[in-house]
Amino acid sequence: MEEKIAFIEKWDAFSAKKIRALLEKKPIMVEEMNVYGEIYTHRQFQIALDAILRRETARSRVCEAVSEKPKPVREIAGELGMKPDEVLRHIVELRRRNLVFVDHIEDGKIPYYRYTAPGGSS
Amino acid sequence: MTQKKSGAVLVVGGGIGGMQAALDLTASGFKVYLLEKGANIGGTMSQLDKTFPTNDCSMCIMSPKLVEVARDPNIELITHADLLSLEGEPGNFTATIARHTKRVDPEKCTGCGLCTQNCPLEVLSEYNEGETGRSAIYINYPQAVPSTYVIDKEDPPCAIACPIHLDVREYVGLIAEGRYDESLAIIRKKLPFPSVCGRICSHPCETMCLRGRKVDEPIAIASLKRFVADYEASSGKPIPVPVVHEKREEKVAVIGAGPAGLTCANDLALKGYQVQVFEKLPVVGGMLAVGIPDYRLPRDVLNKEIDAIKALGVEVNTGVAFGNDKTFEDLEKEGFKAVFFAVGAHKNQTLNVSGEDLNGVIPGVDFLRDLNLGTLTSLSGNVIVIGGGNVAIDAARSALRAGARSVEICYRRSRKEMPANDEEIEEALAEGISFRYLVSPVEIVGKDGKVTGVRMIRMRLSDPDDSGRRRPIPVKGSEQILPADVVIPAIGQRTDVPLLENLGFKLSRRGTLVVDELTLETSRPGVFAGGDLVTGPAMAIDAMAAGKRAAVSIDRYLRGQDLRAGRELEETFFPVEDVREGIEKEPRVAMPEEDPGKRIKTFDEVQLGFTEEMAVQEAKRCLSCRRCLGCGICADVCEADAIDYSIPPSVERVSVGAVILSPGFDEYDPIHKGEYGYGRYPNVVSSIEFERMLSATGPYSSTVMRPSDGDIPQKIAFIQCVGSRDTDHPYCSSVCCMYATKEAIIAKEHLQGIETTIFYMDIRAFGKGFDAYYERAQSQFGVKYVRSMISRVTEDPVTHDLILTYQGEDGALKNETFHMVVLSVGLEASREAIALSKRIGVDLNGYGFCDTHPFTPVSTSRPGVFVCGAFQGPKDIPETVSQASSSVAYAAGLLADARGTELVHEELPEEISVEGQAPRIGVFVCHCGVNIGSVVDVPAVRDYAKTLPDVAYAEDNLFTCSQDTQDHIKEMIAEHQLNRVIVASCSPRTHEPLFQSTIRQAGLNKYLFEMANIRDQCSWVHMHMHSESTEKAKDLVRMAVASARELVPLHEKTLPIIKKGLVIGGGVAGMTAALKLSEQGYEVFLVEKEPELGGNLRNIHFTIEGKDVHAFMEQLIDEVTRNEKIHVITNALIVDFSGTQGNFSTGIMVAPGMYYRKLEHGVVIVATGGEELKPDEYLYGQNDHVMTQLEFEKSLVEEPQFALSQNTVVMIQCVGSRDEQRPYCSRVCCSTAIKNALRLKDKNPDAQVMILYRDIRTYGLMEPYYREARRRGIIFARYDLEQKPEVFEKDGRLTVQFFEPIIKRKVTVMPDTLVLSSATVPRENEELALMLKVPRMADGFFLEAHMKLRPVDFATDGIYVCGLAHSPKTISESIAQAAAAAARAGTVLAKDYISVGGVVAVVDEEKCAACLTCVRACPYSVPVINERGKAEIDPIKCHGCGVCAAECPGKAIELQYFRDVQVLAKCDAINEENEVAA
């Protein structure tokens, strides 16, 4: 798990920070209760965490894929073995986070994306 | 004595309609409670990208209204809330409102967004139609009002579905980890019968299980519950007896030892009460004991759980028949303080056929009871069971075990409608029981008093009945006798009606006991009732829920507490509705069962229970559904300490005089139209999803992309009428043609070179400016329109392109490939609104929209409750806004006496004079949470500000806008004698008025304020450039200081308002406007140029709905003329006009004497109307048999023989409309033609009617009349403008020739009458327009201030327009618009004074050269050259835009608050730094 978080941290430090913050909450949530007094089992906590980790890992892989040169959705999908619609959904979120940008649009048809680390010039 | 009316109004729904109503109401002097179900107001309009026909940005035009609502001190926003009930009468209602918890304190939340950024959870955003994610704590969009964040803690559907809301997710979760004892303890907290329910519960939880609904099969929740109970039992542990902490003396009696009674007894015993149960039967358990066979619920299992209840001290007395052995009086004498009455429903429903008394007929409930009590031990022969519920199955399976040779279940509907549990049916089938469907008994036949068979009749299924199941209908002549030795009718149970009546209870028509739903109180004090006795036969768990509810009531009753408080919200839940991605399918663990061959010989348990391994495996399938995780991170990061997870929901009651409903509509879900592939093909999207794709704040930042692969589509198809004009939705949704046109245009604007094609039936561009927009879409933007409905969309599985098959204009089938398909989805009645209407008693029409009358279009069936917007029927934004104002006119008229009684007025201190003082500037620099603070070095900016000239004080704040900072600013002004204030923060658009009001409260003139926008224009746009941003922030602050040093106080003047109105035009619009103004208490001059009132109503006889127009007109004229406040002046012509809002003066000449009269008034409503064009084509005026629709209508009504004399009538549509000369649609001609055609058919069914049309535009709820016309044989034939019908006389007969596009040949008809649907044109109004200085469109209709949001206002304040003067419309629409104009006018007249001045342009006459530049430049035509030959700008009219000041070549004009000296000082301030830097 730490490995996964470290990978996410490399591309999206804020997201990794949020995951770590959630992990810090685990002892209270699992051994005591969450803020609503609901019981959490280890497994239930893991279900929630796994979903977040899976999604953020996939996003970081998308970041990595477009960090060297701009690529279109289909190329990223092919490289990562993901479905194009899934890649697009991740790109929507990564654009919202100002991590991935449209580099150019080829022939007015195919947008190419690139990754820019936070703080780098956009 | 009548009660004093309330001066407050409740507006339900915060969309554009609700906002407009709220703003008009407060401006008219009423307090408003604006209730919105969602977290924020804004409604659907906030989701739109652009609006037609002006292509304005939707959010840009709406957000000022959002801000206005947020700031209005007399609007109390109640968001995230529901209206539960409405009691009382017009003028005095009490509305009960449920406030759901946001878990965020609105007083503390500053809207900074830190919480949302740090929330680890991501869910789908409803605002972006699921195309993007959002956090679990959220607001919908950045401009949202209120800006308070909301946590959406949602509950798992299983727990919601459970009548006692067992914590399913928790106990199943614990089983998955092997923590069985803890799991069972959680169940037992609420339920004393885990073992019983684990076996026999009908488990509604499983039906709602999201895994079952969205992934594969539901979790076996009941079986898991049974497992933990059995696990405890098998380990030899006894059921733990809880410690009762408090002992109470009061004795409570429970009548009936069934699931309801025992659960109530258990809960009361736990609370410490002395509980005695009285039961008529010799055994305990009610139906659990005598209604359920042993093979499903072994007796020892039941008894063990009953024993545990007894162990709490509950005393159970069997064999006590209440009513005979014991009465309520006895109980009272014995010292019982409260009673729970739960005797169930143990009587059999009879079949009501002959032969039921024969030997061998054993009613189902009796049969099961006798078996369970051992009074019946066996039977033999062939058994027929009649019925389809669980009792029927239990009886059948029991009969088999008791020795029957064969058993057959006969049911009158099919398997699909059978109410019995599926698993029970399966088990019965496995045991060899046969089922016969679609039969119903008509007689039980017998011989010598003994049954020999049942005469059955076959049934067929017709339409669904109230229960939603299809109704069985007997098939004549299909009777047959089925031989039988035993017949068990099991068609339901009922209560013991005579017993209940003897006890004096109130009964429903079904014979069930009537109680208060919330508290279960009966009419007898201290007696509560529940279970089957109240609900009729229901699930055991429902009875247990009633027992629990009663226990709470009885406890409160005995403690003397309020029985209702806080309980209204007990059943309010927000279910989780989505599952996370990527869940793998995994089958449900099957319940092991005894072999059918073995089990049918005994009553031993059939289901054997899960092993531990099975239970864990099954429990691990649980998805642990939830949204907010409850991790607590948002509270940790919230600097304002606003988050409190324990804030409970609350119920509050408000007193209001009227209610306005504006709850909006639901979008049709195209998933129901399988043929279009929505939900299966990723590139088929709904119109609202496409709208979000076009939007800059949408998922793709306004570049439309294909969801399948992100490619930009080059060819997009729009399919119209998806969920409109079909069998389920027989109405037209009115807006789709235009929004599709708009979306097609905008898509082409965004993406050069793409193709957009709209597939349609009729283009319904019926609104003002719509047809021109439609024409522009084709000619200017190249949008393609194809008149063809698409029957099917298929997908190329490799490219995800979409193939549309359609009939081309040439009739041949065509296949065309598109990259994306947009479904123009219709508007449906809102499910929420339907539920709301039922709660408050407002009638709906057949489509689920609010029922209204054509002559009172905004009045609901409940007096004092009004309606506006799409809830009244599909409509666009302007009509919604207009109806909103209209509903205000009705409410304001109703509550005129109470106007102003509940308004809050701010008391302000006297202004401090700063004249002659040197500037002492205070600078407040805001972090805006992290918005500014994480980019800009705010303390550095603060320190820099301190070094600037005349800055006396500077500080930084986390949130300068928070309430405590506002108070702090006031203190600092006093402490440091500040006389200028600068806030460096966000946008003046949203926050300037707040800060201005703060400094005004501190005694400073509000214009001594300046703002530096270091967020939107600095930290947001340079978020990656920290040091540069800080430098820019310093620049902006320095510029603000330079400007602030030049600020001077500005003073507004007040002028009194003449509280009278002038209405021009005495038709339906004018009369309605006059009446609505007078109802609000204002005097009105109603000026009509004709000798009598009535206008066009005189020419119309009935509406399309069949309502009598003349009767309505007579009544209206009567009301107007008898009204003392309305001065009707007929034969009058307006000859001069002057003045401004609040103070107009109008001169009129009155015929026949032609005397001159001067009228003084504060507002003007223009209702000059329109008329039917006299055509100049198709032989009109040359042949007597050619007439207009109005003339035809008159003949139909007034000439008795006319209709019968008509064998053939041809109508031609669009005569004089939609052509080069009049490029607009006259809107009403299609419906008028259909109305008259139908009337002709009523009178002469044999008449042939043919309507030649271009597009049939029966928009909204008029569409069903078009349908009816076609059904009744009226022929519709389409023609094009290029190929108009030809009309000539041939052999003295009128002849019409036209090209029929379906058969593709010319058709010749010789009608008796040719009816021309002629255009509606405005009445002569040019002179009036010039006098009033109000604009007209090229076609002569008046032009309103803004087509979307100010539909009845002119740009000139105080002048309004309505009716046909505005554009063609129906009577109903004219009435609504006229009332709207009256409401808008009322907002001016409600005030005593008007404030003018402030930010206005001022002329220095010394410098003015009277060059007329300002006169030409002003967009509002304000500057005039006065008698001194100088430009003069009336401060009352000036909008403060500054155009004149910028244009004036002589620098003679200055805009106050933005004077040259300020602007120049700012410019110099930029240079200053540059010089230093250089």
Image: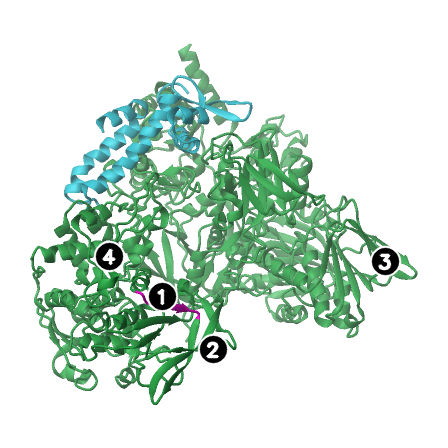
Residue A16 horizontal/vertical position (percent): 27, 28
Mark 4 vs mark 3: which is more N-terminal? 4
- The residue to which callout 4 is attached is B222
Question: Label 3: chain?
Answer: B
| Residue B1023 appears in the rendering | no
Where disc 1 sits, the SS reads loop
- The residue to which callout 1 is attached is B419
The residues tagged by marks 2 and 3 sit, at their Cα atoms, a distance apart of 61 Å
Q: Which chain is cyan?
A: A
Quarter holding residue B1311: bottom right
Q: Colour of chain B?
A: green
Mark 2 vs mark 1: which is more N-terminal? 1
Quarter holding residue B837: bottom left
Classify residue B955 as left or right of residue B86: left
Above or below: residue B604 compared with residue B588 = below
| Residue B615 appears in the rendering | yes
Classify residue B806 as left or right of residue B950: right
